[in-house]
Image (cartoon, coloured by chain):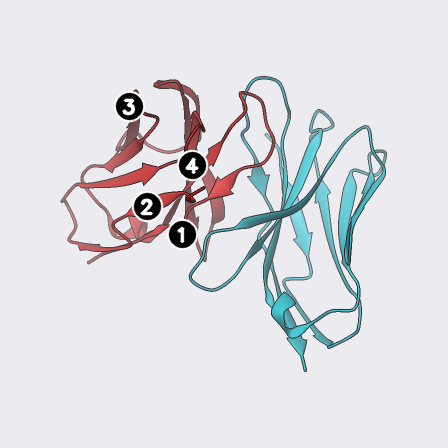
Amino acid sequence: KAGVTQTPRYLIKTRGQQVTLSCSPISGHRSVSWYQQTPGQGLQFLFEYFSETQRNKGNFPGRFSGRQFSNSRSEMNVSTLELGDSALYLCASSSRQDYNEQFFGPGTRLTVL
Amino acid sequence: GENVEQHPSTLSVQEGDSAVIKCTYSDSASNYFPWYKQELGKGPQLIIDIRSNVGEKKDQRIAVTLNKTAKHFSLHITETQPEDSAVYFCAASTSGGSYIPTFGRGTSLIVHP
């Protein structure tokens, strides 16, 4: 099976712009989670989608949003970018409704100038 | 909310030595504890996990122990090899329909040949 894919791998934006990141889960996986990874804050949970519904959300401002499509692919959007949004954004998929093994993608490296 | 402390932040060992990474958690409701390995330029990869009804789990050179009373769990790697060099993350979460992990800050393991 192909792994979790994320596009683009690298992105450079300027403050105030918005960005959309894409994630394709492993075939058959219906749960997709997003994480932000920074040297200062480590790995932080953003939100999780299952069957096109957001089931859980981390402690991030409303500028961070996401959605999931009927084919389980997911996108996350960050509006009004700030310098502090520079990070590696990771997507992970899981085949079960409950916890258990999450498969991470390689991430999208976002740089905000 | 949950708080996970991970130590040490850096661990340097000689090839063939053992390595131990320790994590403590604060929420007694947490019952799922995965460990991830992240190599440069890649997303985290689950290497082993343990649930609160188990005290120890082994997988070849890797083992995890859990002490629910003391709220700490540890990763043990025996006979370390240079390819074990990576950043290791512990996490804690509660089960029950969704998965919102809290991650430790990571341990950079360096195995010298």
Q: Are marks 3 and 4 on the same chain?
A: yes
Are dots 3 and 1 in contact, CB under 8 Å? Answer: no
Q: Chain of mark 3?
A: A
Check the image and report above or below for A70 versus B109: above
User: Along the horizontal axis of the image, is A8 left or right of B46?
Assistant: left
Q: Are marks 4 and 1 on the same chain?
A: yes
Which of label 4 and label 1 is nearer to you? 4
Cα separation, mark 3 vs mark 4, equals 14 Å
Residue B83 on image: x %, y %? 61, 69
Q: Earlier in the sequence, mark 2 or mark 3?
A: 2
Image quarter of residue A53: top left
Are dots 4 and 1 in contact, CB under 8 Å? Answer: no
**Quadrant of image for the N terminus of chain A:** top left
Amino acid identity at mark 4: Ile
Q: Which mark is residue A69?
A: 3
Are dots 3 and 4 in contact, CB under 8 Å? Answer: no
Find chain A in the image and tell me its colour: red
Find chain B in the image and tell me its colour: cyan
